[in-house]
Image: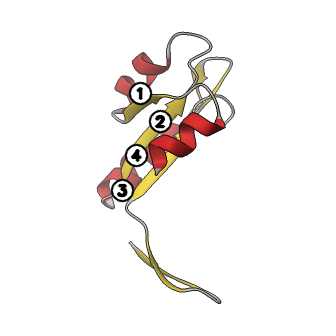
Amino acid sequence: MIYQVVGVGEVELTTLVLDLNGTLAVKGKVVEGVNKRLKKLRNLGFRIILFSGDQRGNARVLANQLNIEFQSAKNADEKERYIL
């Protein structure tokens, strides 16, 4: 999707990178309504990637349930490397 950003101009967004705990889930359980919202974003053409340190050991399972990609990333430096 193309957005107009004041002071920047046109920006095209194609990929959404999300964290698990506190974003998609709380205490290891997916927040109600998240799956529905992710489906809407996928239908708009976004590629959605879950980055997680997987502290609870269930991130890959949750990503599969949400039909999004999973990438293990233990810290901000790893997340930055994968994004770039």
Marks 4 and 3: CB-CB under 8 Å? Answer: yes
Q: Which of 3 and 76 is in front in this view?
A: 76
In this figure, which residue is indicated by the disc labeled 1?
A: 63
- Determine which of the numbered discs, if any, sits on residue 48 in the image: 4
- Determine which of the numbered discs, if any, sits on residue 79 in the image: none
State how far apart marks 1 and 2 are (Cα). Answer: 7 Å
Tell me which label, 1 or 2, sits earlier in the chain.
2
Q: Nearer the viewer, mark 1 or mark 2?
A: 2
Residue 8 coordinates in the image, percent (x, y): 59, 86
Marks 4 and 2: CB-CB under 8 Å? Answer: yes
* Crowding near the residue tagged with mark 1, few <14, some 14–19, many ≥20 C-alpha atoms within 10 Å: many
In this figure, which residue is indicated by the disc labeled 2?
A: 50
Q: Which of 33 and 65 is in front in this view?
A: 65
Residue 73 coordinates in the image, percent (x, y): 53, 29
* Crowding near the residue tagged with mark 3, few <14, some 14–19, many ≥20 C-alpha atoms within 10 Å: some
Q: In this view, does 24 lie to the left or right of 84?
A: right
